[in-house]
Image: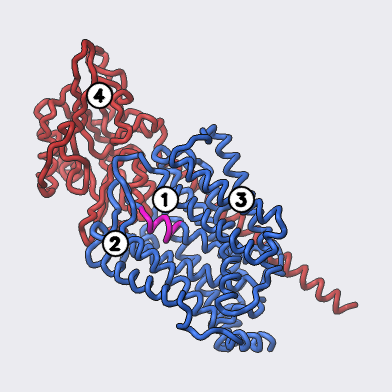
Chain colours: A red, B blue
Amino acid sequence: MTKAMLIDTTRCIGCRSCQVACKSWNELPAEKTAFSETGSNPRHLDASNFTRVLFLESPAPGGAVRWSFVKRQCMHCLEPACASACPVGALEKLATGPVVYRDDRCIGCRYCMLACPFQIPKYQWSARVPYVRKCDFCADRQALAKKPACVETCPGEALRFGERDQLLAEAHRRMKASPGPYAPEVYGERTAGGTSMLYLTAVPFQALGLHHRGFRTDLGETAVGQASQAWMSGVPWVALAVGALSTGLYHLNQRRHRVKEQEEKGD
Amino acid sequence: MATVEQVGSAFTEPGSSPAGTSPWRLVAYYFLATGAIAGAARFVFGLGATTNLNDGYPWGLWISFDVLTGVALAAGGFTLSAIVYVFDLKEFRPLLRPAKLSAFVGYVMVVLGLFFDLGLPWRLWHPLVMWNPRSVLFEVSWCVMLYTTVLALDVLTMILEAREEERWVRILRSIYVALVVAGIVLSTMHQSSLGAMYLLMPEKMSTLWATPALGPLFYSSAIAGGLAVVILEALLGARARRRTPDVELLSSLGKGLAAALLVTFAMRVTDLYARRVPVWSFDGPHLLFYLELFGTVALPAALLGFFPAVRQGRIGLTWCAGLSAFGVALNRFNVSLTSYAGYRDFRYFPSVAEFAVTLGFISLAILAFDFAARRLPLHAPTP
């Protein structure tokens, strides 16, 4: 019963209407843009841009150039690192799929920004009362049984919203039905413990070279946040051992000194 | 009572220079003033306008120095109380109270520093009621709050002694064991957990520092840093307050510092070997790594451990302790800042305001310690 999104980049035409829909649903301010060397715009995700289509050129057979359009936004991990990192539980994975952020809990430590393996949480640096901002999978729309704004608006059916297991089955069906246009992997199926965003690409992610741009291929299949949980499960035992040992030795030393004093008195 | 007599003598220290004469003090006041101005600007104009922090580098100088380095260098308090009470090395007792005072001052600076760095600092108390037991930072914030309280009670006992409030001193003394043990436990937990916070992002860090052993490594290097600061404080503080330092005792503690450094060195080498990290190269991270491991861990360890002449001299001891303390700071910067170089197309170098606030905190820490050291019975015997 957990929702997901299938992002078939081979169907994306790079129109960026998802970016516009996201802005308008979340009431994010428009901003002046500038040309970039690739055509991707705006240049980075930030506190007022929750999604962005990367325009990527890669060599295709026959000396041609192949365009890949890869949409970026929060991956909505099954076990999010941000939620393991946050000291006050401001970030939370809902059973229905979205990873949501609660303004009223956040203390502004920004550990989530460091912990996220996909570099998603962004900060309102220019605000005097700043919060973390990121895509929330349109949790508010989902609560009204609506699709996320980006899915709703996508004209090329590159985005599909549904149950995660059904979308995974669909992804594998597409790969099997026409193996030509697809690289044989679903990014997000097991990446970093699995995410709610599932990607189909023409070129494997490794070859797209997006290591520094939010799509790492060296994350493995365990959730990043498990390191946090593993450490925390050891902490009580260490505390207990150190506490018992110091208390014991303290009293032993005190006793030894008392005995010594008495012996000296006795002599 | 002997205690009261000694308190009295510590109170009117013979030959202590009147405040406000030394040029160093003027420098400290200057940095305190600029830090206060920069700090006010941070609250008026916000983090974005006054710092160079950005989405690629959400943590900068204030976390690396004011928090991580500050906590590590304030480890002398719990280290000395473990040495005296757990390992029963009573000869180090005279250093215990100065160590606790410097730890208290250090932790107050850390908490104040966090106040400037947090986006919503008035919610500093949130972790007390909003729990996330999976989070390493949740544990760290609890430990830091509790340990600062423990240190505050220690310092309170000294203040009450100086004011001869015998009854209150007795009440606080009755929970002294609990305070000692709590201090050791809480410090062990958060000193190592500060390193464990970086277990979540190995893929973003240079392999030289991204290790599963970050927790134990932070712990052992903090012990070295704490000992180094205790030695430095005793030598430099004695000069400032015109006392004669007990060089013999400090050089004996210098042996302990050498041991802590050697353990840290051995752990680092073992870890790098076990992870098969390519160690020999001449790029930026490797040069920082050589400086850290050989220049500030191996070198002072060797000098203190194997050259008694260096260890027994005031100058040698000062330089070795200074080098070790610098090394701990360098390690914290490497783990939390330089390790990420080249990872993203973002750059970070601290702004003038960030430097000003940090320098202000360093000055405030020195002035506050000096102020308290001249008034508290630091050299009275502890039970």
Q: Which mark is residue B135?
A: 1
The residue carrying pointer 4 sits among few (fewer than 14), some (14 to 19) or many (20 or more) residues within 10 Å by Cα, namely many
Query: Horizontal placement of B376 versus A265: left or right?
Result: left
Discs 4 and 1 lie in a common subunit = no
The dot on residue B299 is 3
Residue at 57% from the left image edge and 39% from the top image edge: B271
Give the answer, above or below, for where A61 lies relative to B34: above
Q: Is residue A147 visible?
A: no
Q: Nearer the viewer, mark 3 or mark 1?
A: 3
Specify the amino acid type for callout 1.
Ser
Residue tagged by mark 4? A200
Residue B288 spot, x, y in % from top left = 48, 45
Residue found at x 35% / y 52%: B59
Secondary structure, mark 2, is loop
Query: Toward which corner of the image does residue B175 lie, by quadrant?
Result: bottom right
Q: Are marks 2 and 1 in contact (CB under 8 Å)?
A: no
Query: B213 or B367, which is in the foreground?
Result: B367
Q: Is residue B337 above or below residue A161?
A: below
Magenta: main secondary structure equals helix
Which span of residues is magenta-colored?
A: B60-68
Task: Measure the alpha-carbon separation of dots 3 and 1.
Answer: 36 Å
- As for residue A176 lying within the magenta part, the answer is no
Q: Is residue A192 above or below residue B145?
A: above
The residue under label 2 is which amino acid type?
Answer: Leu
